[in-house]
Image (cartoon, helix red, strand yellow):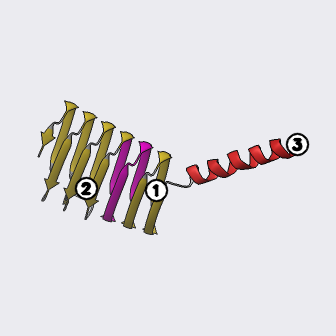
Amino acid sequence: MKKLLFSLVVTVMATSLIYAQSNTSDIYSQGEKNDVTVMQHGNSNSSDVDQDGYKNIANVDQKGHMNDVMINQIGQRNDATAKQNGNGNMSRQTQRDISNEANVNQDGHANSAVQDQAGSYYFWFLPVGNLAEITQKGSRNEAVQVQRGNWNYSDAEQNGNRNYAV
């Protein structure tokens, strides 16, 4: 009986380890004061965070299965957050230069969010930059935002299924 119980415990623990190790994250961070937080709960979630520069922050929070996040930042004072709850969601964010911020919040299944920002501006020594936010609740929603230049703000909020925003 002890051998059977021991074998059962070992099998459960080994299965739990295999299940817990199915999420992947590839992080590269360079410079000073970079901050990266990745939390993945579920199975087959992946994230890739690349940062370069000064005061970059990236947060990834994924709950579900087969979600994918990629955040690339170059420059100073960039901030990117991706929260995904559900299955098969995808988020891509690329930022360059300084004072940019991008946020994605997806709740549902098979949602897609892409943001690409470039450039910033200093006005009287105060940083002024781009801000882009995408919030999607439902299934099979898509949002794409591309910003170039200075003083930009963009917000896409979608509730329901099969919505598309550019």
Cα distance between the residues tagged 2 and 3: 67 Å
Residue 126, given in percent of the width and then of the height, sits at 25, 54
Q: Residue at x 18, y 39 (%)?
A: 156
Is disc 1 in contact with disc 2, using a CB cutoff of under 8 Å? no
Q: Which residues are magenta?
A: 56-84
Give me the disc on residue 127. Answer: 2
Q: Residue at x 35, y 47 (%)?
A: 82
Mark 2 or mark 3, whichever is nearer to me: 3
Q: Residue at x 25, y 64 (%)?
A: 96
Q: Secondary structure at mark 3?
A: helix
Mark 1 or mark 2, whichever is nearer to me: 1
Q: Which mark sits nearer the N-terminus, 1 or 2?
A: 1
Give me the disc on residue 2. Answer: 3
Residue 141, given in percent of the width and then of the height, sits at 21, 39
Q: Residue at x 32, y 45 (%)?
A: 89
Image quadrant where residue 2 sits: top right
The amino acid marked with disc number 2 is Pro
The amino acid marked with disc number 1 is Val
Q: Which residue is mark 1?
A: 36
- Residue 55, compared with residue 110, is above or below; it is below
Residue 163, given in percent of the width and then of the height, sits at 15, 36
Residue 149, given in percent of the width and then of the height, sits at 12, 59
